Image (cartoon, grey):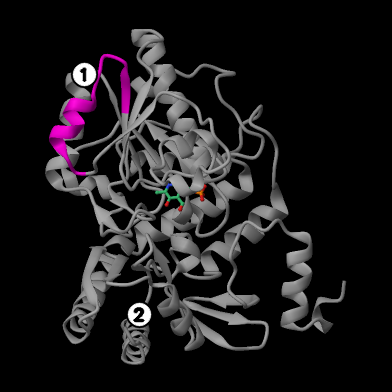
Amino acid sequence: MNLEKMSKEEIMKASDNVLMNTYKRTQVVFTSGKGRTLTDSEGKEYLDMMGGLAACGLGHCPDVLVNAIQEQAAKLIHITNYFYNEPQLELATLLTDNSFGDKVFFGNSGAEANEGAIKLARKYAFTNYGPEKHEIIAMTSSFHGRTLATLSVTNNDKYKVGIEPLPKGFKFTPFNDEEALEKAITPNTCAIMLEPLQGEGGITSATPGFMKKVRELADKHNLLMIVDEIQCGFGRTGTLFAYEQYGITPDIMTLAKSLAGGFPIGAIVATDKVAAAWKPGDHGTTFGGNPLACAAGTAVVSEIINTNIPEKAAASGSYFMEQLEKLVEKYDFIVKTKGKGLMVGLELSFPGAPVVEKAFDKGLVINCTAGNILRFVPPMNITKDELDRCIKIMDQVFSETEV
Ligand SMILES: Cc1ncc(COP(=O)(O)O)c(C=O)c1O
Protein backbone atom coordinates (compact mmCIF):
# COMPACT_ATOMS: atom_id res chain seq x y z
CA MET A 1 0.00 0.00 0.00
CA ASN A 2 1.56 3.27 -1.07
CA LEU A 3 -0.04 5.74 1.32
CA GLU A 4 1.99 8.65 -0.01
CA LYS A 5 0.33 8.32 -3.40
CA MET A 6 -3.19 8.09 -1.98
CA SER A 7 -5.45 11.14 -1.78
CA LYS A 8 -7.32 12.00 1.41
CA GLU A 9 -10.53 10.65 -0.16
CA GLU A 10 -8.83 7.39 -1.15
CA ILE A 11 -7.48 6.88 2.37
CA MET A 12 -10.91 7.52 3.93
CA LYS A 13 -12.69 5.21 1.46
CA ALA A 14 -10.13 2.42 1.89
CA SER A 15 -10.39 2.81 5.69
CA ASP A 16 -14.18 2.51 5.57
CA ASN A 17 -13.75 -0.70 3.57
CA VAL A 18 -11.60 -2.40 6.19
CA LEU A 19 -12.67 -0.84 9.51
CA MET A 20 -15.85 -1.63 11.40
CA ASN A 21 -18.39 1.11 11.13
CA THR A 22 -18.48 2.17 14.80
CA TYR A 23 -17.43 5.83 14.50
CA LYS A 24 -18.97 8.75 12.70
CA ARG A 25 -15.68 10.21 11.54
CA THR A 26 -14.95 13.75 10.42
CA GLN A 27 -13.71 13.93 6.81
CA VAL A 28 -10.04 14.44 7.61
CA VAL A 29 -6.86 12.39 7.86
CA PHE A 30 -4.48 13.71 10.49
CA THR A 31 -0.85 12.92 9.83
CA SER A 32 1.12 14.78 12.50
CA GLY A 33 0.78 16.81 15.67
CA LYS A 34 2.99 19.01 17.82
CA GLY A 35 1.89 20.84 20.93
CA ARG A 36 -1.68 21.97 20.42
CA THR A 37 -1.47 21.85 16.62
CA LEU A 38 -2.66 19.01 14.42
CA THR A 39 -1.76 18.82 10.72
CA ASP A 40 -3.85 16.99 8.14
CA SER A 41 -2.76 15.06 5.04
CA GLU A 42 -3.11 18.19 2.93
CA GLY A 43 -0.95 20.32 5.20
CA LYS A 44 -3.78 22.28 6.85
CA GLU A 45 -3.21 23.09 10.53
CA TYR A 46 -5.82 22.93 13.29
CA LEU A 47 -5.88 24.15 16.89
CA ASP A 48 -6.73 21.10 18.95
CA MET A 49 -9.11 21.93 21.81
CA MET A 50 -10.17 18.29 22.08
CA GLY A 51 -6.74 16.91 22.98
CA GLY A 52 -7.47 13.37 21.80
CA LEU A 53 -10.58 13.40 24.02
CA ALA A 54 -8.69 14.68 27.07
CA ALA A 55 -5.89 12.13 26.62
CA CYS A 56 -3.13 14.36 25.23
CA GLY A 57 -2.74 16.32 28.47
CA LEU A 58 0.68 17.64 27.48
CA GLY A 59 -0.20 18.18 23.83
CA HIS A 60 0.85 16.18 20.80
CA CYS A 61 4.21 14.45 20.78
CA PRO A 62 5.79 16.35 23.70
CA ASP A 63 9.57 15.76 23.76
CA VAL A 64 9.45 14.29 27.24
CA LEU A 65 7.02 11.57 26.13
CA VAL A 66 8.62 10.91 22.74
CA ASN A 67 12.04 10.51 24.36
CA ALA A 68 10.74 8.22 27.10
CA ILE A 69 8.96 5.99 24.56
CA GLN A 70 12.00 5.86 22.26
CA GLU A 71 14.40 5.03 25.08
CA GLN A 72 12.18 2.37 26.63
CA ALA A 73 11.26 0.88 23.24
CA ALA A 74 14.94 0.28 22.54
CA LYS A 75 15.37 -1.41 25.94
CA LEU A 76 12.31 -3.57 26.72
CA ILE A 77 8.81 -3.17 25.30
CA HIS A 78 6.88 -6.02 26.85
CA ILE A 79 7.23 -8.95 29.17
CA THR A 80 4.25 -10.24 31.16
CA ASN A 81 3.04 -9.66 34.68
CA TYR A 82 4.57 -12.99 35.68
CA PHE A 83 7.76 -10.96 36.06
CA TYR A 84 8.71 -7.65 37.68
CA ASN A 85 9.68 -4.62 35.63
CA GLU A 86 11.21 -1.32 36.70
CA PRO A 87 8.97 1.21 34.87
CA GLN A 88 5.87 -0.34 36.50
CA LEU A 89 7.38 0.21 39.95
CA GLU A 90 8.26 3.81 39.04
CA LEU A 91 4.77 4.69 37.81
CA ALA A 92 2.93 2.92 40.64
CA THR A 93 5.12 4.75 43.16
CA LEU A 94 4.44 8.08 41.48
CA LEU A 95 0.68 7.45 41.66
CA THR A 96 0.64 6.24 45.27
CA ASP A 97 3.02 9.00 46.45
CA ASN A 98 0.71 11.60 44.95
CA SER A 99 -2.74 10.26 45.87
CA PHE A 100 -4.69 8.61 48.69
CA GLY A 101 -3.86 5.21 47.21
CA ASP A 102 -1.51 2.50 48.44
CA LYS A 103 -1.76 -0.01 45.61
CA VAL A 104 -2.16 0.16 41.82
CA PHE A 105 -3.32 -2.26 39.13
CA PHE A 106 -2.47 -1.35 35.54
CA GLY A 107 -4.70 -2.09 32.56
CA ASN A 108 -4.96 -0.67 29.06
CA SER A 109 -7.90 1.70 28.97
CA GLY A 110 -10.48 3.57 30.99
CA ALA A 111 -13.24 1.03 30.57
CA GLU A 112 -10.89 -1.72 31.61
CA ALA A 113 -9.91 0.22 34.74
CA ASN A 114 -13.59 0.66 35.65
CA GLU A 115 -14.38 -2.97 34.88
CA GLY A 116 -11.57 -3.93 37.27
CA ALA A 117 -12.76 -1.45 39.90
CA ILE A 118 -16.23 -3.04 39.82
CA LYS A 119 -14.68 -6.48 40.22
CA LEU A 120 -12.47 -5.27 43.07
CA ALA A 121 -15.37 -3.63 44.93
CA ARG A 122 -17.46 -6.79 44.63
CA LYS A 123 -14.62 -9.04 45.72
CA TYR A 124 -13.94 -6.77 48.71
CA ALA A 125 -17.59 -6.89 49.78
CA PHE A 126 -17.82 -10.65 49.13
CA THR A 127 -14.74 -11.32 51.24
CA ASN A 128 -15.77 -9.07 54.10
CA TYR A 129 -19.57 -9.28 54.11
CA GLY A 130 -20.68 -12.17 51.89
CA PRO A 131 -22.19 -12.60 48.41
CA GLU A 132 -25.43 -10.65 48.95
CA LYS A 133 -23.55 -7.36 49.19
CA HIS A 134 -22.73 -6.87 45.52
CA GLU A 135 -24.91 -4.04 44.20
CA ILE A 136 -23.31 -0.88 42.81
CA ILE A 137 -25.04 2.50 42.68
CA ALA A 138 -24.05 4.80 39.81
CA MET A 139 -25.27 8.25 38.78
CA THR A 140 -27.63 9.59 36.17
CA SER A 141 -25.73 11.05 33.17
CA SER A 142 -22.71 8.93 34.07
CA PHE A 143 -20.24 7.50 31.57
CA HIS A 144 -17.84 4.78 32.61
CA GLY A 145 -17.04 2.92 29.38
CA ARG A 146 -18.27 0.53 26.70
CA THR A 147 -17.64 -2.96 28.10
CA LEU A 148 -20.71 -4.83 29.32
CA ALA A 149 -20.14 -4.15 33.04
CA THR A 150 -19.14 -0.52 32.50
CA LEU A 151 -22.24 0.00 30.37
CA SER A 152 -24.21 -1.24 33.38
CA VAL A 153 -22.97 1.84 35.26
CA THR A 154 -23.27 4.14 32.23
CA ASN A 155 -26.56 6.00 32.24
CA ASN A 156 -27.11 6.34 28.52
CA ASP A 157 -29.54 3.90 26.92
CA LYS A 158 -28.40 4.57 23.37
CA TYR A 159 -25.20 2.56 23.99
CA LYS A 160 -27.20 -0.44 25.23
CA VAL A 161 -29.59 -1.03 22.34
CA GLY A 162 -29.32 -4.53 20.93
CA ILE A 163 -26.76 -5.91 23.36
CA GLU A 164 -28.83 -6.55 26.46
CA PRO A 165 -29.03 -8.26 28.88
CA LEU A 166 -26.22 -6.44 30.67
CA PRO A 167 -24.75 -7.77 33.93
CA LYS A 168 -27.15 -7.35 36.84
CA GLY A 169 -26.67 -5.72 40.23
CA PHE A 170 -26.42 -2.04 39.25
CA LYS A 171 -28.74 0.91 39.69
CA PHE A 172 -28.77 4.65 39.09
CA THR A 173 -29.61 7.54 41.37
CA PRO A 174 -29.89 11.23 40.38
CA PHE A 175 -26.47 12.90 40.32
CA ASN A 176 -26.05 15.41 43.15
CA ASP A 177 -29.26 14.34 44.93
CA GLU A 178 -28.16 13.45 48.47
CA GLU A 179 -31.56 12.31 49.67
CA ALA A 180 -32.18 10.03 46.70
CA LEU A 181 -28.76 8.46 47.15
CA GLU A 182 -29.46 7.71 50.79
CA LYS A 183 -32.76 6.09 49.85
CA ALA A 184 -31.14 3.99 47.10
CA ILE A 185 -28.80 2.23 49.53
CA THR A 186 -29.87 -1.26 50.67
CA PRO A 187 -28.09 -3.95 52.70
CA ASN A 188 -26.98 -5.36 49.32
CA THR A 189 -25.17 -2.21 48.21
CA CYS A 190 -21.40 -2.63 48.01
CA ALA A 191 -20.22 0.56 46.31
CA ILE A 192 -21.13 4.00 45.00
CA MET A 193 -19.44 5.01 41.75
CA LEU A 194 -19.23 8.52 40.31
CA GLU A 195 -17.23 11.00 38.26
CA PRO A 196 -16.30 14.09 40.32
CA LEU A 197 -16.81 16.05 37.10
CA GLN A 198 -18.98 14.23 34.57
CA GLY A 199 -17.55 14.42 31.06
CA GLU A 200 -19.68 12.63 28.47
CA GLY A 201 -22.83 13.35 30.49
CA GLY A 202 -22.46 17.10 29.95
CA ILE A 203 -19.54 18.61 31.98
CA THR A 204 -21.34 18.64 35.33
CA SER A 205 -19.48 18.88 38.65
CA ALA A 206 -20.39 16.91 41.72
CA THR A 207 -21.42 19.42 44.37
CA PRO A 208 -19.22 19.58 47.49
CA GLY A 209 -22.19 18.45 49.59
CA PHE A 210 -22.83 15.44 47.37
CA MET A 211 -19.23 14.22 47.38
CA LYS A 212 -19.14 14.55 51.18
CA LYS A 213 -22.44 12.70 51.45
CA VAL A 214 -21.17 9.85 49.30
CA ARG A 215 -18.18 9.49 51.64
CA GLU A 216 -20.35 9.73 54.73
CA LEU A 217 -22.86 7.14 53.49
CA ALA A 218 -20.10 4.85 52.32
CA ASP A 219 -18.57 4.90 55.80
CA LYS A 220 -21.92 4.46 57.52
CA HIS A 221 -23.02 1.46 55.43
CA ASN A 222 -19.63 -0.19 54.79
CA LEU A 223 -19.65 0.68 51.09
CA LEU A 224 -16.78 1.63 48.85
CA MET A 225 -16.56 5.02 47.18
CA ILE A 226 -15.24 4.65 43.63
CA VAL A 227 -14.26 7.83 41.80
CA ASP A 228 -13.73 7.73 38.06
CA GLU A 229 -11.05 10.34 37.27
CA ILE A 230 -10.41 9.00 33.80
CA GLN A 231 -11.38 12.26 32.12
CA CYS A 232 -11.05 14.79 34.95
CA GLY A 233 -7.81 13.52 36.51
CA PHE A 234 -4.18 14.59 36.15
CA GLY A 235 -4.56 18.28 36.75
CA ARG A 236 -7.37 19.10 34.37
CA THR A 237 -9.65 20.53 37.08
CA GLY A 238 -6.87 22.46 38.85
CA THR A 239 -5.60 19.82 41.28
CA LEU A 240 -3.77 16.63 40.36
CA PHE A 241 -6.95 14.70 41.14
CA ALA A 242 -10.39 16.26 41.30
CA TYR A 243 -11.36 14.49 44.55
CA GLU A 244 -8.73 16.60 46.37
CA GLN A 245 -10.98 19.65 46.07
CA TYR A 246 -13.71 18.01 48.14
CA GLY A 247 -11.80 17.30 51.35
CA ILE A 248 -12.47 13.56 51.09
CA THR A 249 -10.61 10.54 49.83
CA PRO A 250 -12.21 7.68 47.90
CA ASP A 251 -11.49 3.99 48.39
CA ILE A 252 -10.89 3.31 44.71
CA MET A 253 -9.96 5.67 41.86
CA THR A 254 -9.76 4.84 38.17
CA LEU A 255 -7.41 6.57 35.73
CA ALA A 256 -6.59 6.48 32.01
CA LYS A 257 -6.60 9.17 29.25
CA SER A 258 -3.94 11.73 30.36
CA LEU A 259 -2.06 9.12 32.39
CA ALA A 260 0.40 8.48 29.57
CA GLY A 261 -0.43 11.45 27.35
CA GLY A 262 -2.16 9.41 24.66
CA PHE A 263 -0.26 6.14 25.02
CA PRO A 264 -2.85 3.46 25.95
CA ILE A 265 -2.90 2.68 29.67
CA GLY A 266 -5.40 2.59 32.51
CA ALA A 267 -5.03 2.18 36.26
CA ILE A 268 -6.99 1.25 39.35
CA VAL A 269 -5.70 2.92 42.52
CA ALA A 270 -6.97 1.67 45.89
CA THR A 271 -6.24 1.68 49.60
CA ASP A 272 -4.32 -1.25 51.09
CA LYS A 273 -7.48 -2.36 52.88
CA VAL A 274 -9.49 -2.64 49.66
CA ALA A 275 -6.66 -3.96 47.48
CA ALA A 276 -6.16 -6.81 49.97
CA ALA A 277 -9.33 -8.42 48.56
CA TRP A 278 -7.39 -9.45 45.45
CA LYS A 279 -5.11 -12.45 45.56
CA PRO A 280 -2.97 -13.88 42.73
CA GLY A 281 -5.27 -15.04 39.94
CA ASP A 282 -8.21 -12.77 40.85
CA HIS A 283 -7.53 -10.31 38.03
CA GLY A 284 -5.01 -9.97 35.24
CA THR A 285 -4.07 -8.75 31.79
CA THR A 286 -1.36 -9.47 29.24
CA PHE A 287 -0.40 -5.92 28.31
CA GLY A 288 -1.42 -3.91 31.38
CA GLY A 289 1.53 -2.26 33.07
CA ASN A 290 4.06 -3.26 30.46
CA PRO A 291 7.41 -1.44 30.52
CA LEU A 292 6.71 0.75 27.49
CA ALA A 293 3.31 2.00 28.70
CA CYS A 294 4.62 2.61 32.21
CA ALA A 295 7.70 4.49 30.99
CA ALA A 296 5.34 6.69 28.97
CA GLY A 297 3.14 7.19 32.04
CA THR A 298 6.06 8.03 34.31
CA ALA A 299 7.34 10.63 31.84
CA VAL A 300 3.93 12.29 31.59
CA VAL A 301 2.92 12.21 35.25
CA SER A 302 6.37 13.45 36.36
CA GLU A 303 6.11 16.33 33.91
CA ILE A 304 2.58 17.17 35.08
CA ILE A 305 3.76 17.31 38.69
CA ASN A 306 7.16 18.96 38.13
CA THR A 307 5.89 21.74 35.89
CA ASN A 308 2.79 22.52 37.99
CA ILE A 309 0.35 21.61 35.25
CA PRO A 310 -2.64 21.55 37.66
CA GLU A 311 -2.00 25.19 38.64
CA LYS A 312 -1.54 26.16 35.00
CA ALA A 313 -4.77 24.39 34.05
CA ALA A 314 -6.61 26.28 36.78
CA ALA A 315 -5.25 29.65 35.63
CA SER A 316 -5.76 29.00 31.91
CA GLY A 317 -9.18 27.58 32.67
CA SER A 318 -10.37 30.66 34.51
CA TYR A 319 -9.03 32.94 31.76
CA PHE A 320 -10.78 30.82 29.13
CA MET A 321 -14.00 30.77 31.13
CA GLU A 322 -13.95 34.61 31.39
CA GLN A 323 -13.64 34.87 27.61
CA LEU A 324 -16.42 32.34 27.09
CA GLU A 325 -18.65 34.33 29.46
CA LYS A 326 -18.33 37.24 27.02
CA LEU A 327 -19.73 35.00 24.29
CA VAL A 328 -22.57 33.94 26.62
CA GLU A 329 -23.45 37.63 27.03
CA LYS A 330 -23.15 38.33 23.31
CA TYR A 331 -25.25 35.45 21.94
CA ASP A 332 -28.72 34.68 23.27
CA PHE A 333 -28.57 31.09 22.11
CA ILE A 334 -25.65 30.26 24.43
CA VAL A 335 -27.16 29.13 27.73
CA LYS A 336 -24.13 29.00 30.04
CA THR A 337 -20.58 27.87 30.68
CA LYS A 338 -19.91 24.70 32.65
CA GLY A 339 -16.97 22.90 34.17
CA LYS A 340 -13.73 23.54 36.00
CA GLY A 341 -10.13 24.23 34.98
CA LEU A 342 -9.56 22.99 31.47
CA MET A 343 -12.59 20.71 31.36
CA VAL A 344 -15.05 23.20 30.00
CA GLY A 345 -18.51 23.04 28.49
CA LEU A 346 -20.56 25.63 26.66
CA GLU A 347 -24.26 24.84 26.73
CA LEU A 348 -26.22 25.80 23.62
CA SER A 349 -29.97 26.02 23.25
CA PHE A 350 -29.80 23.75 20.17
CA PRO A 351 -27.76 20.71 19.03
CA GLY A 352 -24.06 21.50 18.83
CA ALA A 353 -22.99 19.26 15.91
CA PRO A 354 -23.27 21.95 13.20
CA VAL A 355 -21.21 24.35 15.35
CA VAL A 356 -18.52 21.70 15.75
CA GLU A 357 -18.44 21.24 11.96
CA LYS A 358 -18.18 24.97 11.26
CA ALA A 359 -15.41 25.37 13.83
CA PHE A 360 -13.57 22.48 12.20
CA ASP A 361 -13.73 24.13 8.79
CA LYS A 362 -12.10 27.18 10.38
CA GLY A 363 -9.28 25.08 11.83
CA LEU A 364 -10.56 24.46 15.35
CA VAL A 365 -11.07 20.97 16.76
CA ILE A 366 -13.77 20.74 19.44
CA ASN A 367 -16.56 18.29 20.05
CA CYS A 368 -20.04 18.17 21.44
CA THR A 369 -21.33 16.04 24.28
CA ALA A 370 -24.82 15.30 25.60
CA GLY A 371 -26.26 16.77 22.37
CA ASN A 372 -25.88 20.47 23.07
CA ILE A 373 -22.78 20.98 25.21
CA LEU A 374 -19.66 22.06 23.31
CA ARG A 375 -16.72 20.47 25.07
CA PHE A 376 -13.23 21.94 25.42
CA VAL A 377 -10.61 19.60 26.93
CA PRO A 378 -7.41 20.94 25.35
CA PRO A 379 -3.85 19.97 26.21
CA MET A 380 -3.25 21.49 29.64
CA ASN A 381 -0.16 23.42 28.56
CA ILE A 382 -2.19 25.48 26.09
CA THR A 383 -1.10 29.13 25.79
CA LYS A 384 -3.12 32.33 26.22
CA ASP A 385 -2.65 33.12 22.51
CA GLU A 386 -4.10 29.76 21.58
CA LEU A 387 -7.07 30.24 23.89
CA ASP A 388 -7.64 33.67 22.34
CA ARG A 389 -7.52 32.07 18.89
CA CYS A 390 -10.12 29.52 19.94
CA ILE A 391 -12.42 32.27 21.25
CA LYS A 392 -11.98 34.27 18.06
CA ILE A 393 -12.97 31.30 15.90
CA MET A 394 -15.94 30.48 18.15
CA ASP A 395 -17.06 34.10 17.93
CA GLN A 396 -16.89 33.92 14.12
CA VAL A 397 -18.80 30.63 14.07
CA PHE A 398 -21.52 32.00 16.38
CA SER A 399 -21.81 35.21 14.39
CA GLU A 400 -22.61 33.07 11.33
CA THR A 401 -25.02 30.81 13.23
CA GLU A 402 -28.70 31.19 12.44
CA VAL A 403 -31.08 29.87 15.05
C1 LIG B 1 -15.20 9.30 32.86
C2 LIG B 1 -14.84 8.24 31.87
N1 LIG B 1 -14.75 6.98 32.27
C3 LIG B 1 -14.42 5.99 31.43
C4 LIG B 1 -14.16 6.24 30.11
C5 LIG B 1 -13.80 5.11 29.18
O1 LIG B 1 -12.46 5.18 28.85
P1 LIG B 1 -11.91 4.41 27.56
O2 LIG B 1 -12.49 5.05 26.37
O3 LIG B 1 -10.41 4.56 27.66
O4 LIG B 1 -12.32 2.98 27.70
C6 LIG B 1 -14.24 7.55 29.63
C7 LIG B 1 -14.02 7.85 28.21
O5 LIG B 1 -14.41 8.86 27.68
C8 LIG B 1 -14.59 8.57 30.54
O6 LIG B 1 -14.69 9.85 30.14
- Magenta stretch? 176-191
Mark 1 lies on a secondary structure that is: loop
Which residue matches tag 2? 383
Q: In which quarter of the image is the N terminus?
A: bottom right
Residue 324's x, y, as percent?
Answer: 24, 78
Q: How far apart are marks 2 and 1 (CA)?
A: 46 Å
Mark before the other along the chain sequence, 2 or 1: 1
Q: Which mark is residue 221?
A: 1
In the displayed structure, 199 sits above or below 168; it is below
Residue 320 as seen in the image, left or right of residue 212: right
Say which amino acid is labelled 2.
Thr
Q: Is residue 313 magenta?
A: no
Q: Does the magenta stretch include residue 185?
A: yes
User: Label 2: how many residues lie within 10 Å, few (<14), some (14-19) or many (20+)?
Assistant: few
Q: Is the C-beta of the residue carrying label 2 under 8 Å from the nearest atom of ligand 1?
A: no
Quarter location, residue 108: top right
Q: Which of 271 and 225 is in front in this view?
A: 225
The structure residue drawn at horizontal position 57% and vertical position 51%, both measured from the top left corner, is 264
Residue 338 as seen in the image, left or right of residue 371: left
User: Label 1: how many residues lie within 10 Å, few (<14), some (14-19) or many (20+)?
Assistant: some
Residue 29's x, y, as percent?
Answer: 65, 76
Residue 312 as seen in the image, left or right of residue 293: left
In the displayed structure, 372 sits above or below 159; it is below
In the displayed structure, 340 sits above or below 320; it is above
Mark 2 lies on a secondary structure that is: loop
